Image (tube, rainbow, N blue to C red):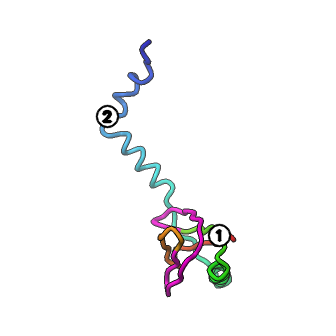
């Protein structure tokens, strides 16, 4: 049996690269500015990073990158002057971090 729905929408997706344009519009719609953190929030982040580093506990980090909020879980293995390094060899800058969940 012939699936009419796939044939019906095939020309729509090829017209003027509409699929790529729709994906780009969806991406732009989710972009927002980085929230401004208070001094108390920054101190709390610093305290939680140091606690997690010294106890080798698993943490979840909410961070901001290019207009979108992301989440990363792991164990902190090293702390630099402006970066934290994780067990999976990835790193985050302190200014990207929005919140730490222990």
Q: CA distance from mark 2 to mark 1?
A: 48 Å
The N terminus lies in which quarter of the figure?
Answer: top left
Q: Hey, which residue is sitting farthest top in the picture?
A: 1
Mark closer to the observer (2, 1)? 1
Q: Position of 101 compared to 6: left or right?
A: right
Residue 23 in magenta? no
Question: What residue is at 51 percent from the left and 55 percent from the top?
Answer: 30
Question: What residue is at 57 percent from the left and 71 percent from the top?
Answer: 35
State the image coordinates of residue 39 (x, y, percent, origin top left). Answer: 64, 85
Q: Tag 1: Cα neighbours inside 10 Å, few (<14), some, or many (≥20)?
A: few
State the image coordinates of residue 86 (x, y, percent, origin top left). Answer: 53, 72
Question: What secondary structure is marked by label 2?
Answer: helix
Question: What residue is at 40 percent from the left and 22 percent from the top?
Answer: 8
* Residues in magenta, as a range: 64-85
Q: Is residue 69 above or below residue 14?
A: below
State the image coordinates of residue 82 (x, y, percent, origin top left). Answer: 49, 84
Q: Hey, which residue is sitting farthest left in the picture?
A: 16
Which numbered disc covers residue 15? 2
Which numbered disc covers residue 58? 1
Q: Position of 97 compared to 22: left or right?
A: right
Q: Quadrant of residue 9?
A: top left
Q: Quadrant of residue 28?
A: bottom left
Q: Position of 75 compared to 13: left or right?
A: right
Q: Hey, which residue is sitting farthest bottom in the picture?
A: 81
Question: What residue is at 42 percent from the left and 24 percent from the top?
Answer: 6
The disc, 2 or 1, on the residue closer to the chain's N-terminal end is: 2
Q: Is residue 86 above or below residue 15?
A: below
Residue 65 in magenta? yes
Q: Is residue 98 above or below residue 2?
A: below
Q: Nearer the viewer, residue 97 or 78?
A: 78
**Magenta-colored segment: predominant secondary structure:** strand
């Amino acid at each position: 049996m012939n699936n009419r729905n796939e044939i019906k929408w095939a020309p729509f997706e090829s017209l003027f690269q509409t699929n790529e344009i729709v994906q780009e519009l969806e991406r732009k719609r989710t972009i927002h500015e980085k929230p401004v953190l208070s001094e108390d929030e920054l101190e709390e982040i610093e305290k939680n990073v140091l606690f997690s580093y010294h106890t080798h506990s698993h943490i979840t980090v909410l961070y901001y990158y290019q207009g979108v909020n992301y989440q990363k879980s792991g164990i902190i293995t090293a702390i630099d002057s402006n970066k934290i390094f994780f067990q999976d060899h990835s790193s985050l800058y302190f200014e990207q971090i929005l919140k730490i969940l222990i």
